[in-house]
Image (cartoon, rainbow, N blue to C red):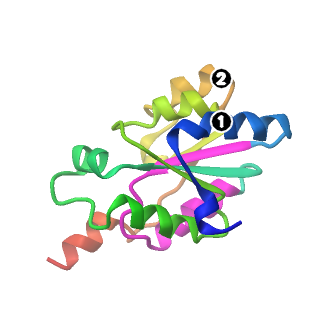
């Protein structure tokens, strides 16, 4: 699959998820800004992929990153961030969402597993939506020393 084939529009993602479910694929989701990709992201995304058959990454739009992280972010625009993610072999699909949380996206996908960083805990903001459709939360431990915010701070 090419990088462009991995990009899914928001209006297409529910149909994609339904097709995958019909093929008995275990759908895994995660989300984030993925602004400056680093080893922490790679580790996190690899572990997310190990939780099922298909990994769909919800990517915060530029406007939602600004709302969540401040006016200086993102460093890379949503198109660049999305294309960078599609180049990773363990990422199957990328969809850009515009809210500050991925909950509306998760309602469309109804993942079997949603992966989040352990710092957000089992009762993260996504948990009620994921559990409503029978899914579970999988937490990944954070690798110390890897953080986009830290990388940016060290350069200023």
- For the C terminus, the image quarter is bottom left
Who's the residue at 71% across and 66% down the image?
1
- 48 part of magenta stretch: yes
Q: x, y percentage for residue 90?
A: 66, 64
Q: Is residue 73 above or below residue 98?
A: below
Residue located beneath label 2 in the image: 133
Q: x, y percentage for residue 65?
A: 29, 50
- Depth order, front residue of 118/41: 41
Q: x, y percentage for residue 153?
A: 20, 71
In this view, which residue lies farthest toward the right? 23
Query: Do the numbered discs 1 and 2 sit on residues whose CB atoms are within 8 Å?
Result: yes
Q: Is residue 102 above or below residue 118?
A: above
Residue located beneath label 1 in the image: 111
Q: Is residue 20 above or below residue 7?
A: above
- Circle 1 SS class: loop
Who's the residue at 61% across and 24% down the image?
131
Query: Gap between marks 1 and 2, in whole Å?
Result: 8 Å
In this view, which residue lies farthest toward the bottom? 155
**59 left or right of 75?**
right
Who's the residue at 52% across and 29% down the image?
127
- Circle 2 SS class: loop
What residue span does the magenta drawing correspond to? Answer: 27-49
Who's the residue at 58% across and 64% down the image?
4
């Amino acid at each position: 699959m090419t990088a462009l084939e991995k990009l899914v529009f928001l209006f297409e993602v529910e149909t994609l998820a339904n097709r995958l479910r019909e093929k008995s694929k275990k759908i895994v989701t995660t989300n984030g800004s993925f602004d400056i990709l680093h080893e922490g992201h790679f580790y996190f995304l690899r572990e997310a992929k190990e939780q099922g058959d298909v990994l769909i990454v919800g990517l915060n739009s530029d406007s939602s990153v600004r709302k969540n992280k401040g006016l200086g972010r993102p460093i890379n625009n949503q198109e660049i961030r999305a294309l960078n993610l599609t180049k990773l072999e363990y990422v199957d699909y990328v969809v850009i969402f515009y809210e500050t949380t991925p909950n509306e996206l998760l309602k469309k996908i109804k993942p079997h597993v949603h992966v989040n960083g352990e710092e957000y805990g089992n009762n993260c903001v996504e948990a009620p939506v994921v559990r409503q459709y029978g899914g579970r939360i999988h937490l990944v431990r954070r690798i110390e020393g890897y953080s986009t915010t830290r990388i940016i701070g060290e350069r200023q």
